[in-house]
Amino acid sequence: MISIGNFLFRFRNILFPLCFGLALVGRTPLLPSEWLAFAIGFAIALSGQILRALTIGLAYIKRGGKKRRIFAKGLVTDGIFAHCRNPLYLGNILIIIGVGIAINSFWFAVGGGIFFIFAYYAIVAAEENFLQEKFGNVYDEYCKDVNRFMPRLHGMASTIRSMKFHWKRLVVKEYGTTFSWFAGLCMIQLLKDRYLASGFHLHSDTGLLWGGLLFLAILLYGVARFLKKSRIIRAD
């Protein structure tokens, strides 16, 4: 499992876009109501995004590794990491499952969810092996106190209130992830209407809504990227 995790860690950034292909597989709806599916799914995806935002804004841990290998200079145990050892990965799982439900795709929600859970289980196994070897007993004690995935809600509000929220860091580090899943969601809804004939026939006004939201997402992505590249906003 550790070797699989090390392999998946190197290519984890392409796993999310690849899962969108599952939306094109089959026409099995998850729920009878498209709008109910969207409401439930979007709420789940948004909860995952909020979890990621809180994690990055309070006490960020560099997940990029070094030369596409697992690496850590120090053990981060404050912020959301005081309540969950892998909040960013948990957020990703919630996003992928939420998007799958929102587009009412059985294969995306179930297949993508199962694959992501397995992938992150393997990646976490590899990361835990690395962290245990590097930090030893300190990491062991941290693992005893904090769950791998299930967040400890007790005291989380106090943690959030007691720490400074770095919104500039959030914009610089997170605009790409937010754009990817939201723009992907909008594009799939448009594709379902225009090409997939999945039984969800959007009215022209609704099609304009998805197109407008996609345009807004692209615009905000461009603004955030400009602010980052021009160093008007820097991660603090």
Image (spheres, grey):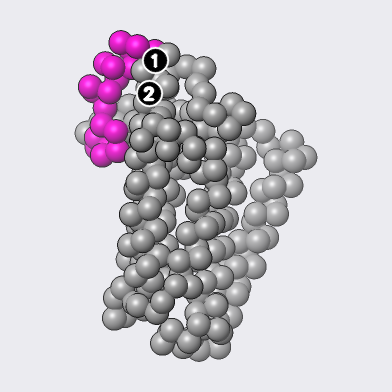
Q: CA distance from mark 1 to mark 2?
A: 6 Å
Q: Which mark is residue 129?
A: 2
Q: Residue at x 39, y 79 (%)?
A: 27
How crowded pointer 1 is (Cα within 10 Å; few <14, some 14-19, many 20+) is rated as few
Q: Which residue corresponds to mark 1?
A: 133
Q: Residue at x 74, y 41 (%)?
A: 229
Q: Residue at x 44, y 42 (%)?
A: 52
Quadrant (top left/top right/bottom left/bottom right) for the N terminus: top left
Kind of residue at disc 2 = Asn
Tell me if I can see residue 38 in this picture: no
Front one among 94 and 122: 122
Q: Which residues are magenta?
A: 135-153
Q: Residue at x 55, y 77 (%)?
A: 190
Q: Are marks 1 and 2 in contact (CB under 8 Å)?
A: yes
Front one among 105 and 36: 105
Kind of residue at disc 1 = Glu
Q: Determine the secondary structure under disc 1.
A: helix
Residue 109, image x, y percentages: 36, 63
Residue 59, image x, y percentages: 46, 28
Quadrant (top left/top right/bottom left/bottom right) for the C terminus: top right
How crowded pointer 2 is (Cα within 10 Å; few <14, some 14-19, many 20+) is rated as few
On screen, residue 8 above or below 43: above
Q: Quadrant of residue 112?
A: bottom left
Residue 158, image x, y percentages: 30, 30
Residue at the extreme right of the image, as rendered: 230
On screen, residue 77 above or below 80: above
Residue at the extreme top of the image, as rendered: 137
Tell me if I can see residue 120 in this picture: yes
Q: Quadrant of residue 42?
A: bottom left
Give the number of marks.
2
